[in-house]
């Protein structure tokens, strides 16, 4: 309707990581493939000067949309060195709220959690992706801006905490975590022409 938008989506990503294996001094042709499935829900609401939007992804190997995720090797053929793969699953959600037009304030909250691999892993050095050694990631930011027809001045503070740890062979989950926190200030002046 005029104030509300709701969306849902499904993403299926087939991937063929390699076509040959070099194993025990021999080269073998391999036909390896992994298919990842992801689901998305999103919504946006706006009325007068207030705007609220949110999104949540539950997915496997979400690296193609620059999120944490990837895949690992679950089995290695002892004769040809061919791999069987297992995807890592993550849930990522965010919420953004703003109020105002000329003078605007906003808050952004996000969270991503590593739910582990679908199957057990053959080795922790045979995982491919980004952020696979992060159990969960928390992001919070607040911003204010002054908006004119062709000029914007803004200031934002962001807090980001990642909980790094060790990948478990049993289920791909991250254990023995420690937190690393980043503080960031951003100042903006933009001219539109």
Image (tube, rainbow, N blue to C red):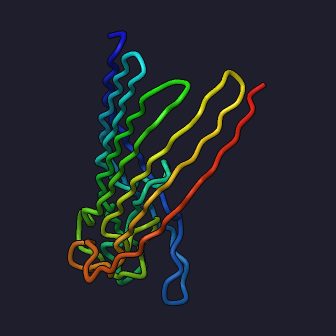
Who's the residue at 50% across and 32% down the image?
104
Who's the residue at 49% across and 65% down the image?
183
**Residue 4's x, y, as percent?**
32, 18
Based on the displayed image, in which of its 4 quarters is residue 164 positioned? bottom left
Q: Is residue 101 above or below residue 97?
A: above
Q: Quadrant of the image for the N terminus?
A: top left
**Residue 97's x, y, as percent?**
38, 35
Q: Answer left or right for 38 relative to 145.
A: left
Q: Is residue 47 above or below residue 98?
A: above
**Does residue 177 appear anywhere in the picture?**
yes
Based on the displayed image, in which of its 4 quarters is residue 55 positioned? top left
Q: Is residue 20 above or below residue 100?
A: below
What is the residue that sits farthest to the right in this orientation? 193
Q: Answer left or right for 119 relative to 83.
A: left
Who's the residue at 41% across and 62% down the image?
70
**Residue 141's x, y, as percent?**
43, 51
Based on the displayed image, in which of its 4 quarters is residue 57 positioned? top left
Towards the viewer: 13 or 24: 13
Q: Quadrant of the image for the C terminus?
A: top right
**Does residue 122 appear anywhere in the picture?**
no
Q: Answer left or right for 154 relative to 163.
A: right
Q: Answer left or right for 98 relative to 102.
A: left
Who's the residue at 53% across and 49% down the image?
156
Towards the viewer: 68 or 75: 68
**Residue 69's x, y, as percent?**
40, 60
């Amino acid at each position: 309707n005029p104030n509300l938008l709701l969306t849902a989506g499904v993403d299926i990503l087939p991937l063929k990581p390699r076509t040959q294996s070099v194993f025990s001094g021999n080269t073998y042709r391999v036909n390896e493939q992994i298919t990842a499935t992801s689901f998305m829900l999103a919504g946006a609401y706006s009325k007068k000067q207030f705007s609220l939007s949110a999104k949540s992804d539950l997915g496997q190997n979400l690296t193609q949309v620059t999120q944490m995720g990837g895949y690992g090797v679950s089995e290695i053929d002892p004769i040809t060195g061919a791999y069987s793969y297992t995807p890592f699953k993550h849930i990522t959600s965010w919420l953004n709220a703003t109020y105002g037009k000329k003078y605007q304030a906003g808050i952004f909250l996000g969270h991503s959690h590593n739910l582990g691999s679908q199957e057990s892993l053959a080795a922790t050095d045979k995982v491919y992706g980004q952020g696979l050694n992060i159990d969960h990631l928390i992001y919070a930011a607040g911003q204010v801006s002054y908006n004119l027809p062709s000029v914007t001045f803004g200031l934002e503070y962001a807090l980001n905490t990642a909980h790094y740890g060790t990948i478990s062979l049993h289920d791909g989950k991250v254990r023995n975590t420690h937190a690393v926190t980043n503080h960031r200030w951003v100042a903006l002046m933009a001219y539109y022409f």
